[in-house]
Amino acid sequence: MLHTFKGGIHPDGMKYLTNDKPIEKLAPPPFVVLPVSMHIGAPCTPLVNKGDHVYMAQKIADSDGPVSAPVHATISGIVRDVLPYPHPNGTDVLSVIIDNDYKDELDPSVKPFDVGRMTTVEIISAIRDGGIVGHGGAAFPTHLKISSGLNKVDTVLINAAECEPYITSDHRILLERTAEVIEGAKVLKRVFGEVRTFICVESNKQNAFDVISKRLLPDDGITLFPLRTKYPQGAEKQLIYSVTKREVPSGKLPADAGCAVFNADTAGAVYRLFSEGLPDMRRVVTVSGSAICTPKNLEVRIGTPIDALINACGGFKKQPERLLMGGPMMGNALYSLDVPVIKGTNAVLALCGKETVPFKESSCIRCGKCVKACPIKLLPTYIYQRYRKGSVEDLDKLNVLDCIECGACAYVCPAKIPLVSGIRAAKQRVQDARRAKK
Ligand code: SF4
Ligand code: SF4
């Protein structure tokens, strides 16, 4: 039986472009660009200066902020500069640029951990020092997700839904690096006190489901959980509902529903940390879209400029009309190929032709499709109307802050009303008003 949530949509998955492409390792680039902010929370402060030699895996930026994760060198070499540099978020962010000496000289302090002998506090501290953040896109620091869920969480969910169209990086990881995901899941299970643990996979990845079910042992205490293919099945609240039938209360976190959700490759990063001592320094990125010559799944060092990924896929075969980091539903527009891969980069898409059909907005016909599609049970059409002509109080009453910006409402709207951009601006208005009241 396949499990799911209420609402949602079924966009064309477009995963056939890369779902049978094995992961290729991209050679380390001539230089990497490592922003001091690759996580939600306060930016880090650089610990190195121009001209310094750095080892691979050496910590090069850190912060005292509670919602931060340190940054590590992903190659060995010489710091070319520390300066503001274009970031995938569209702004310039302080970044450490390292020129590659092509030696991959590992920091001498790096060594595997004996995780079986470590306490919960030691495991959390190691995950923090390893700079691990969510690899699914949100980049929430993993140590904080664990520490804030201790004594609340009774269910760990390894999120391998990968519901965004085009993206297949997690699918390939499940197929090719199954042991990494399972072993990482076992560490996460243990840190919460051997709680029930599920690896959650959508039905469009049957081969991954089969591979994992063969590798899981009864003693692992991990259950494979089948999900219906639907967008946004991988959103935390929808995944939690699908598996446990629990609802995360408005304004609360998954831990308030007794759950902790980790992306499949985040579990892999946890495994690599404890088995090899390596911090968060590489990830798999799907490069796809009809403007790409040869779409691929590439394993790259974090900090690799995006143009190196495009070149590794043979460049553009057509002029892209839309460049995205992430999926077409929730990804960010990319304005430069100079920006680097960051910890949350799961895909780079170059779209053109039918993939980017220009739309003409018309008036709302009150069809209610947006309401039916909303997985949070919001009223997108009313929120949009109140955003155009209403008060902050009206917007707050419509629970606009619960919107996860999944884009399902705008996708189904026959009038092509830009619901998500309006709702995003409405959220900002409510947040500004709340801050002003404090
Ligand atoms: S209102 Fe928000 S949560 Fe609901 S469908 Fe639209 S973008 Fe998704
Ligand atoms: S889907 Fe579009 S046209 Fe239909 S009710 Fe919602 S906003 Fe109006």
Image (cartoon, helix red, strand yellow):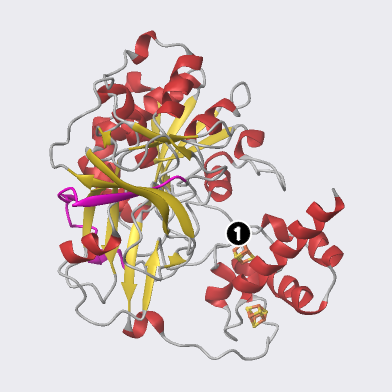
- The amino acid type found where label 1 is placed reads Pro
Name the foreground residue: 173 vs 146: 146
Instruction: Name which quarter of the figure residue 286 lies in.
Output: bottom left
Please name the residue shown 50% across and 22% down the image.
Answer: 195
Q: Position of residue 294 (x, y in %)?
A: 17, 68
Please name the residue shown 67% across and 68% down the image.
Answer: 425
Asked whether residue 161 appears in the rendered view, the answer is no
Q: Position of residue 57 (x, y in %)?
A: 29, 32
Q: Quadrant of ligand 2?
A: bottom right
Judge whether 17 appears above or below 366 on screen.
Answer: above
Instruction: Name which quarter of the figure residue 422 lies in.
Output: bottom right
The residue under label 1 is 375
Judge whether 294 appears above or below 211 on screen.
Answer: below
Question: Furthest-top residue in view?
Answer: 117
Magenta stretch holds residue 18: yes
The span shown in magenta is 14-36
Within 8 Å of ligand 1, the CB of disc 1?
A: yes
Asked whether residue 201 appears in the rendered view, the answer is yes
